[in-house]
Amino acid sequence: MSEIDDSWGFATLGVRAFEPERHAGEHSAAIHPTSSFVHRSAAHAAKVFAGEEPGNVYSRFTNPTVQAFEKRLAAMEGGESCVATASGMAAILTLCMSVLKAGDHVLVSKSVFGATINLFNNVLTRFGLTVSYVELANVSAWKAALEPQTKLLFVETPSNPLAEIADIRALADLAHAHGAWLAVDNCFLTPVLQQPIKLGADFVIHSATKYLDGQGRCVGGAVIGDAQKVGKDVFAFMRSAGPCMSPFNAWVFLKGLETLAVRMRAHNESAQKLAEWLLAQPKVQRVFYAGLPAHPGHALAKSQQRGFGGVVSFEVAGGREGAWKVIDATQLCSITANLGDTRTTITHPATTTHGRVTADARAAAGITEGLIRIAVGLEDIEDITADLARGLA
Ligand SMILES: *Cc1c(COP(=O)(O)O)cnc(C)c1O
C-alpha cells in the first residue's frame, strides 16, 4: 500500500493516497464484497476482536474498500479520520447521534438542504435536541442565537440555491469560545475548492452522492474530523448502529476521488462562464453566483475558497411561467433537482426543492417564482448556453 507523501499536491492525493493493497497485481483497486473476515487461528481471532492486532472482523465495523475511500477523503479534507455512511443524510444523523445528547442545542443555517431541516425538526428533536435556525451570512446573528446548551453549529456554505457564504473562520472561533463545535456540509464545493477543517471547522459532512461520485450512480456520505471525535466516537456509533457504506459504493466513490480535482476545476470554470453569460441576457434579471464580483459574498468566498463551485442560480422575468418556459425549452439539460453530475441539471426551486416550504418562508428566503437553478455539468459550455438561449429568446 502506498500510503501518503507530505510533498504530494492535491490532485496526487486524490489519485494516489492510501491505494489499497494489491492481491493479484491489479492496478485498479479491488472491491471487497464480504460481510465477515476469517482469522488465522482462534488466538488470532481473539486478538483482532480485542483490538490488540489490526485486522477486519465484520463489514459493519471496517471493510478494506470502505477504508480506502475513508482514508483518501480524510487526507483530501485535511482531517485525521473519516467514517463513511450510507448517504449524506446518514452522515448528518451519525454525527449528531455520536457527539450530542438530549438537552443539547444546535444552531443550523436557515438555508440548509431540506432533508437536513426535516431530520433536525422531525427526528432529532424527538430525542431531546433543541434546534434554532440562523441567517447563514450574519455572524452577529449566530452569536446572538447561542444558548448555554449550544453544542453544535451546522452550516452549509455556499447556500443552495442563492450561493450565500458563511464566514467559516468566524463561526469556528465563535463555536470554540462557547465550548461548541462547527460542522460544515461541504457537498457543494468538495475539498478541491474548500477545506473547512483548515479554516477551523471541527467536522465536515459530505453527501458523496453529488460531486464525490460525480456521475450520479451511488448514494453515500461521510463524516470527517479528528481522531477522537470521529476516529473513536463516530466510529463507535457506526459499529453499534450500522448506517455504513457498502463496499461497492465505496469503490465507486474511490474512483470518483481520482478524477475529483479535474472535474471540479471544469465544473467551476464552466459555471463562471455561464454566470457571466447569463448576466448579459436581457431576460435575466439577477444572477446568483459568488464568482461574480457584485455578489455580496464574493470577497469572503475568495478568501476561503479556491473556486466558486458548479451551481448557478438566476431569476428570469415572468415569474413561474417565465421560469418554466426556460426549463421546458431545454433539450440538453436534465430537468432534475440532483447536482454534481457530468450532465447539466436544471430545476425550479420554488416548486421542487423548496416546494413544501410555505410561500411566505420561501419569499423570506429569496426563492422567487422566477428563480432557476443550474448545476453545470461537463458538457461544452457553448452547448449549455445554446440550450438556455432557446427559452430565453
Ligand atoms: C444531497 C445533499 C444532502 C443529502 O445527501 P444524500 O446523499 O442525498 O442523503 C445533504 N446536504 C446537501 C448539501 C446535499 O446537496
Image (spheres, rainbow, N blue to C red):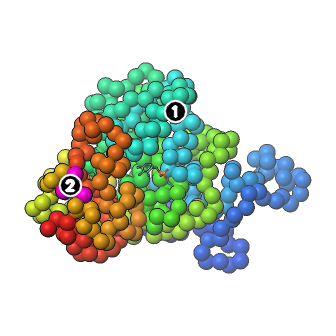
Q: Residue 47 placed where, x, y %? A: 82, 49
Q: Which residues are magenta?
A: 320-324
Q: Residue at x 32, y 57 (%)?
A: 347
Q: Residue at x 76, y 53 (%)?
A: 57
Q: Is residue 70 visible?
A: yes
Q: In the image, is residue 114 part of the stretch drawn in magenta?
A: no
What residue is disc 1 on? Answer: 124
Q: Residue 124 placed where, x, y %? A: 51, 32
Q: Residue at x 14, y 58 (%)?
A: 284
Left or right: residue 87 compared with residue 131: right
Left or right: residue 229 compared with residue 130: right
What residue is disc 2 on? Answer: 321
Instruction: Give 151 or 19, whichever is nearer the viewer.
Output: 151
Is 94 placed above or below 149 here?
below
Instruction: Give 326 or 270, whichever is nearer the viewer.
Output: 326
| Quadrant in which residue 127 is drawn | top right
**Residue type highlighted by circle 1:** Leu
Q: Residue 229 placed where, x, y %? A: 56, 40
SS state under label 1: helix
